Image (tube, grey):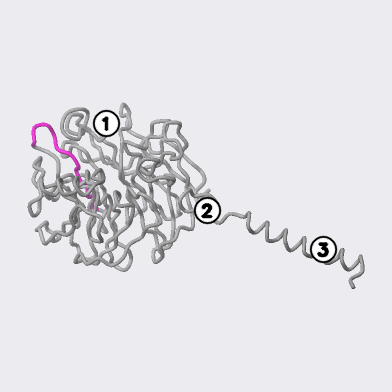
């Protein structure tokens, strides 16, 4: 028979054990959907980062990249346009407001180092800086006259146009033609890859997808030689692997694999350089843009919300390239009109120090109105 003292000790030990179980049960695991419990590696926020020339005001943006030669930041603003920049013709765009839309900024100070691209495009969308420092821009929309847009342009760092792909002002689905090009990237061997077709993310029924395909809408990747000759394309509107609902951004990893942000399908799709599907990532949200730095991927979600991706928060999710796992999260700005969602940019770039730069798109302008935001590690 147990003595009172032994009973008391046993009861106390059980209580401690039960308390430990309770504490463990109440502790929350990190949540990649909301970002709760995940570390923020770049907590210092600078809104309205990047200085514009006198008299210029910020328009929207969706793209940034890092210059591989000096580490500074390239990006664009849509010539003062507060929306998609005259998409569909009319309104303010880089066709109606003839200023240079593409900028190079000092990554430390935000001062302008270069400003190029005037008179060439309507609505810049994707941006890529190749290993030689040349700047590539996808021109998403056409002008009212049908003489500009739906092309991809290559510029020298000083703004000389070297190459254009697509047919100016003429959207279509023929080989080598574009219908709302989203992004461009140069592959390891110099081949050019363009993601094409922006509106497919809005097709949310099988009937809508079938009708879009019938009328010639696109959602695909096209590959060209280094001098701009069409090689092949792959993908169409759909939800299967190798299909897309808005291939919004492109980038190669260190292994030479092509990553595609399939925004409407809430995933990243990975291909070899010939278009063979390899694998997918699903834990990074409704991705508008992403950046691969070393063995980490930084994916920015600007569109998740209660009506299109319930419970998911906007923001930047960070994880290892070779795993479908989120290990860190940069939260969005809070805004009353984006309940449970917050507001984050569309384009993203990461500099050598780990500072993160976001380009604010038409759905993600912060309350101060700036087009770029810098998230600093300290």
In the rendered view, tell whether residue 87 sits above or below residue 175. above
Side of 103 relative to 321 (left or right): left
Residue 331 location (% of width, % of height): 47, 45
Local secondary structure at mark 1? loop
Instruction: Tell me the number on the disc at residue 38.
Output: 2
Instruction: Tell me the number on the disc at residue 300.
Output: none
- Which residue is under mark 3? 11
Disc with the residue nearer the chain's start (2 vs 1) = 2
Residue 78 sits inside the magenta stretch: no
Alpha carbon distance from label 1 to label 3: 71 Å
Closer to us: 8 or 228: 8
Alpha carbon distance from label 3 to label 2: 37 Å
**Residue bounds of the magenta highlight:** 134-146
Local secondary structure at mark 3? helix
The answer to whether the residues at label 1 and label 3 have Cβ atoms under 8 Å apart is: no
User: Disc 3 vs disc 2: which is toward the camera?
Assistant: 3
Residue 350 location (% of width, % of height): 40, 52
Instruction: Tell me the number on the disc at residue 81.
Output: 1
Closer to us: 74 or 325: 325
Residue 19 location (% of width, % of height): 72, 58
Disc with the residue nearer the chain's start (1 vs 3) = 3
Within-10-Å neighbours for mark 2: few <14, some 14–19, many 20+:
some
Residue at 32% of width from left, 57% of height from top? Answer: 268
Local secondary structure at mark 2? loop
Residue 111 location (% of width, % of height): 38, 39
């Amino acid at each position: 028979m147990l003595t009172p003292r032994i009973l008391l000790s046993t009861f106390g030990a059980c209580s401690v054990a039960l308390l430990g179980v309770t504490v463990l049960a109440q502790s929350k695991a990190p949540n990649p959907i909301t970002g709760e419990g995940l570390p923020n590696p770049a907590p210092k926020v600078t809104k309205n980062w990047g200085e514009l020339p006198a008299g210029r005001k910020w328009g929207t943006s969706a793209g940034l990249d890092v210059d591989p030669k000096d580490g500074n930041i390239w990006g664009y603003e849509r010539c003062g346009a507060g929306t998609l920049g005259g998409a569909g013709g009319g309104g303010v765009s880089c066709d109606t407001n003839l200023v240079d839309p593409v900028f190079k900024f000092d990554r430390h100070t935000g001062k302008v180092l270069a400003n190029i691209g005037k008179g060439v495009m309507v609505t810049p969308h994707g941006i890529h800086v190749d290993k030689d420092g040349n700047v590539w821009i996808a021109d998403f929309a056409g002008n009212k006259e049908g003489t500009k847009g739906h092309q991809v342009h290559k510029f020298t760092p000083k703004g000389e146009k070297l190459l254009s792909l697509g047919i100016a002002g003429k959207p279509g689905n023929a080989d080598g033609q574009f219908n709302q090009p989203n992004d461009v990237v140069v592959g390891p061997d110099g081949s050019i890859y363009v993601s094409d077709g922006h509106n497919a993310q809005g097709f949310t029924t099988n009937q809508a997808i079938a009708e879009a395909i019938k009328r010639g809408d696109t959602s695909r990747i096209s590959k060209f030689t280094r001098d701009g000759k069409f090689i092949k394309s792959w993908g169409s509107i759909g939800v299967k692997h190798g299909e897309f609902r808005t291939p919004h951004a492109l980038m190669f990893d260190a292994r030479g694999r092509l990553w595609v942000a399939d925004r409407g399908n809430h995933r990243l799709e990975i291909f070899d350089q010939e278009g063979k599907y390899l694998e997918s990532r699903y834990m990074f949200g409704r991705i508008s843009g992403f950046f691969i730095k070393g063995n980490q991927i930084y994916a920015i979600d600007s569109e998740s919300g209660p009506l299109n991706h319930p419970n998911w928060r906007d923001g930047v999710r960070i994880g290892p390239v070779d795993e479908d796992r989120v290990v860190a999260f940069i939260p969005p700005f809070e805004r009353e009109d984006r309940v449970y969602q917050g507001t984050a940019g569309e384009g993203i770039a990461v500099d050598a120090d780990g500072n993160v730069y976001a380009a604010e798109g038409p759905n993600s302008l912060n309350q101060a109105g700036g087009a770029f935001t810098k998230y600093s590690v300290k």
